[in-house]
Amino acid sequence: MGFTRCPCCALSPLPPLSTVDADLVSAGLLLVDTHNHLHQSAGGGAVRRCDSYEAVLAVAEACWDSVLARCAEGPRSLPGLGVHPWQAHEVAEGWEARLRALLQQHPRALVGEIGLCKCARSLRGPGAKARVWPQQLRVFRTQLALAAELQRPTSVHCVKAHSSLVAALDDLDVLPPAVGLHSFSGSAHQIGQLLSTRAGPRLYFGFSHTVNVAMGGAAEPQPALLDAIRAVPERKLLVESDCADERSATLALPLALRLVADARGWTLERAARTTTENGLRFLRGDDGDDRDAGGAERPVCVACEPTAGSDESARPRLLVVSQCSR
Ligand SMILES: [Zn+2]
Ligand SMILES: [Zn+2]
């Protein structure tokens, strides 16, 4: 299954932040959709926004190949491989070894979509919670540990389970380099609490119109959501479509940008620029606090492949292409 070499990883250069051209951003031509499921799009592999980056997240082992196939076609699409909390009770024997092998084959892949969801349908019904929740926790913790060991960014779904998320992160000796809490549904207060934990500096908070506004049936964002968006440090804000079809995603990403811009009192251009830079940093597995002394942004080599390793010091250090010795 899969590819002999990694087309998605080989062909997905992320530009250094200095080349995130202000004009492109302000024209809406370079955006980062940090969480979608467009491998499920009926349109096949067509990439809809040629100058945008995206992370395409699997939800179960059955779609790992289609995620990789989509990302092989679009040079700016990064694959996410993992098992979603709603599917955690269905994993097949040996899934963990197969996930590890595939992640090692694809050094640019994220771990995701993974997570914890107290609202999962699998938890409903007599006796289901006692049986399924421990399994959901096990599957999540296994994948979180894999993201830490392989030093990959991870896209995490967490609904009404923030204390279990913090406990899982606290139990790791080494943290994943960047943890994106996608379509974040917690409060501003919870954001403050999460940021004050040991993993706080590694956390990003993603917002979508799809889940954060439209799913609740509201025409307008709730005040608590706007408060939450305002509580996120500027360098930790992400936008996402969380859509599974091209047409919806094309509409949903600008709506997510508008949501962030309105909550923060920013122009759309500022929201686009900020979330694009943050999105690229997140996809590279850079925690966003990672600045050289003096505050300069550390430049990035898009040609260097990250090396796997559990040692924090072995985490890929990226350099400017022109200065790269490899
Ligand atoms: Zn999700
Ligand atoms: Zn999702």
Image (cartoon, helix red, strand yellow):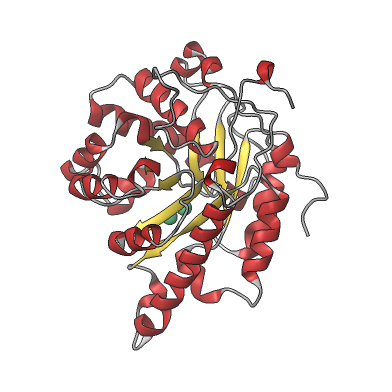
Query: In front here: 305 or 76?
Result: 305
Q: Position of residue 119 (x, y in %)?
A: 33, 67
Could you tell me which quadrant the N terminus lies in?
bottom right
Q: Indicate the position of residue 307 as horizontal and vertical percent values.
A: 66, 43
Residue that sits furthest to the right in the current view: 4
Residue pushed farthest top? 23
Report the front residue among 247 and 294. Answer: 294
Say if residue 207 shows up in the picture: no
Whether residue 107 appears in this view of the structure is yes
Please give the count of numbered marks on the rendered protein.
0
Q: Pinpoint residue 57: horizontal percent, then vertical percent.
A: 55, 51
Residue 272: quadrant of the picture: top left
- Residue at point 76% right, 41% down? 7
Residue furthest toward the bottom?
126
Residue 134's image quarter? bottom left
Q: Residue at x 20, y 44 (%)?
A: 188
Image position of 284 with respect to 156: above or below: above
Q: Residue at x 33, y 58 (%)?
A: 166
164 w.r.t. 127: above or below:
above
Q: Quadrant of the C terminus?
A: top right
Left or right of 185, for residue 177: right
* Residue 35 x %, y %: 48, 44
